[in-house]
Image (tube, helix red, strand yellow):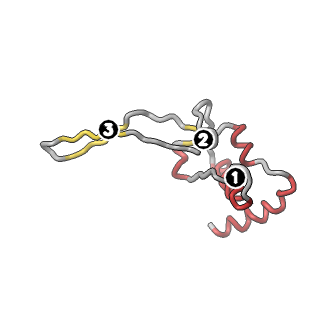
């Protein structure tokens, strides 16, 4: 599971009674599935939508990777590897019709 951890230093100016937050490190994007940061590809609208739909279908059917969560808010921190993307988005052919029906219903419910 993806764990995005931002580390901050709190610098307290006692005379001004203010706090300023400094980002400790510039975080590299990580893969939404394997959490590695090697050769990450950014999601575009199409790949993101496809991945979200397939993850929702996997969750509904209790398939492998049903625990993976992805949101538009996380896009600045995550991307994907083609192999990881395929692991989530490729479904057995026998589920194609059911997935098409699911995606039509899912699009209406958003």
Q: Residue furthest top?
A: 38
Q: Which residue is mark 1?
A: 50
- Which numbered dot is residue 9? 3
Q: Residue furthest right?
A: 94
Q: Position of residue 102 (x, y in %)?
A: 75, 64
Q: Position of residue 100 (x, y in %)?
A: 79, 61
Q: Secondary structure at mark 1?
A: helix
User: Callout 1: 10 Å neighbours few (<14), some, many (20+)?
Assistant: some
First in sequence: mark 3 or mark 2?
Answer: 3
User: How many marks can you see?
Assistant: 3
First in sequence: mark 3 or mark 1?
Answer: 3
Q: From what the image shows, is residue 35 above or below residue 59?
A: above
Q: Which residue is mark 2?
A: 79
Q: Identify the residue at image location x=73%, y=43%.
A: 87
Q: Identify the residue at image location x=83%, y=57%.
A: 96
Q: Secondary structure at mark 2?
A: strand
Identify the image quadrant of residue 10: top left
Q: Position of residue 83 (x, y in %)?
A: 72, 37
Q: Secondary structure at mark 3?
A: strand
């Amino acid at each position: 599971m993806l764990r995005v951890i931002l580390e901050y230093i709190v610098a307290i100016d006692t005379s001004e009674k203010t706090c300023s937050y400094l980002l400790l490190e510039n975080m590299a994007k990580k893969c939404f599935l394997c959490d590695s940061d090697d050769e990450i590809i950014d999601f575009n609208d199409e790949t993101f939508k496809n991945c979200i739909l397939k993850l929702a279908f996997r969750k509904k059917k209790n398939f492998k990777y049903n625990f993976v969560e992805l949101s538009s808010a996380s896009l600045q921190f995550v991307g994907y590897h083609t192999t990881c993307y395929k692991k989530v988005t490729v479904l057995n052919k026998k589920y194609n019709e059911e997935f098409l029906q699911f995606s039509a219903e899912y699009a209406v419910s958003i």
